[in-house]
Image: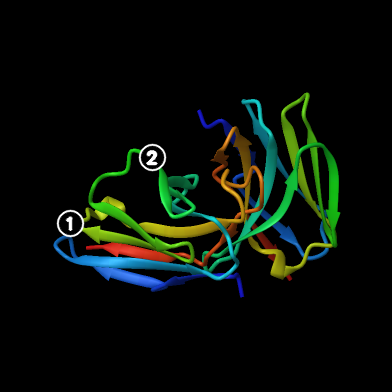
């Protein structure tokens, strides 16, 4: 049990589809993050939410749209994706903002996304 | 060039061997992390270091701030240690990741 739950674990979608990834944490953390992990590349930060407010958008294309309705839930809405968007999408949370600088990151198991 | 470099990229060992994974970074940092990523994708934080050495079970992490270098050691390695080990550093409130070292421990 990681404390951070992501669904679905696997997702295959066409380029014209619209889907959403979900992340849930019940650790009482105040910061949540979306990362992208492509094959043989380092993790890339996509979005940061601190106290439900988006504080960072790392030049992510608009076909990725995050939503944080409350401090426990984070979504990543996907539409008109490209095959190069196929990757593992990881959600993480931390007690305090700072991406691990002030409190450890807790990761979910990720959603393996394939865009056909 | 990535600001965080790990070596080796891939490592295969026999059960029981002593393992060392290295991480070098080129920026000023406030902390360094070692993460373990299991084949299913989930990532677990192993250590957070700002100086010296930490030990947890068979895992030891060291950091040399002056040389901008850290090592992760695994003693008496076991097949269940097979995973990708990722080094990451905090630069202000940002985190920079290495590409990972894929470790396979054979029985």
> How busy is the neighbourhood of tag 2: few (under 14 within 10 Å), some, or many (20 plus)?
few
Residue identifier under label 2: A58
Q: In screen coordinates, is A73 left or right of B56?
A: left
Residue lying furthest left = A16
Q: Residue at x 59, y 32 (%)?
A: B92
Q: What kind of element bears circle 2?
A: loop
Residue B90: image tag: none
Q: Which of the chains bears the disc numbered 1?
A: A
Pointers 2 and 1 in contact (CB under 8 A)?
Answer: no
Of residue A27 and residue B20, the one placed in the foreground of this image is A27
Q: Is residue B54 above or below residue B27?
A: below
Residue A4: percent from left, percent from top: 54, 68
Q: Is residue A23 above or below residue A95?
A: below
- Confirm whether circles 2 and 1 share one chain: yes
The C terminus of chain B is located in which quarter? bottom right
Residue identifier under label 1: A80
Q: Residue at x 66, y 53 (%)?
A: A104
Specify how the rendered protein is coloured: rainbow
Q: Is residue A37 visible?
A: no
Q: Residue at x 69, y 34 (%)?
A: B30
Residue B45: percent from left, percent from top: 66, 56
Q: Which of the chains bears the disc numbered 2?
A: A
Of residue B12 and residue A88, the one placed in the foreground of this image is A88
Of residue A9 and residue B5, the one placed in the foreground of this image is A9
Q: Is residue A113 visible?
A: yes
Q: In screen coordinates, is B23 left or right of A90?
A: right
Residue A57: percent from left, percent from top: 37, 42
Q: In screen coordinates, is B56 left or right of A71?
A: right
Q: What kind of element bears circle 1?
A: loop
> How busy is the neighbourhood of tag 1: few (under 14 within 10 Å), some, or many (20 plus)?
some
Q: In screen coordinates, is A3 left or right of B15?
A: left
Q: Quick one: label 2 or label 1, which is nearer the N terminus?
A: 2
């Amino acid at each position: 049990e990681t404390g951070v739950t992501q669904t679905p674990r696997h997702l295959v979608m066409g380029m014209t589809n619209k889907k959403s990834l979900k992340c849930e944490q019940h650790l009482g953390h105040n910061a949540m993050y979306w990362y992208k992990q492509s094959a043989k590349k380092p993790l890339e930060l996509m979005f940061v939410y601190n106290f439900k407010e988006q504080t960072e958008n790392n030049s992510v294309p608009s076909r990725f749209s995050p939503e944080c309705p409350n401090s426990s839930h984070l979504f990543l809405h996907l539409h008109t994706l490209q095959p190069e968007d196929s990757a593992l999408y990881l959600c993480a949370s931390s007690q305090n903002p700072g991406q691990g600088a002030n409190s450890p990151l807790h990761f979910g198991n990720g959603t393996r996304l394939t865009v056909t | 060039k990535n600001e965080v470099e790990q070596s080796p990229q891939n490592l295969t060992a026999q059960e029981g061997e002593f393992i060392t994974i290295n991480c070098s970074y080129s920026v000023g940092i406030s902390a360094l992390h070692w993460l373990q990523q299991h084949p299913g994708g989930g990532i677990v934080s192993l250590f957070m270091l700002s100086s010296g050495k930490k030990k947890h079970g068979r895992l030891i992490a060291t950091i040399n701030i002056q040389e901008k270098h850290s090592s992760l050691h695994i003693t008496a390695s076991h097949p269940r240690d097979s995973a990708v080990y990722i080094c990451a550093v905090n630069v202000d409130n940002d985190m920079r990741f290495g590409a990972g070292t894929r470790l396979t421990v054979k029985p």
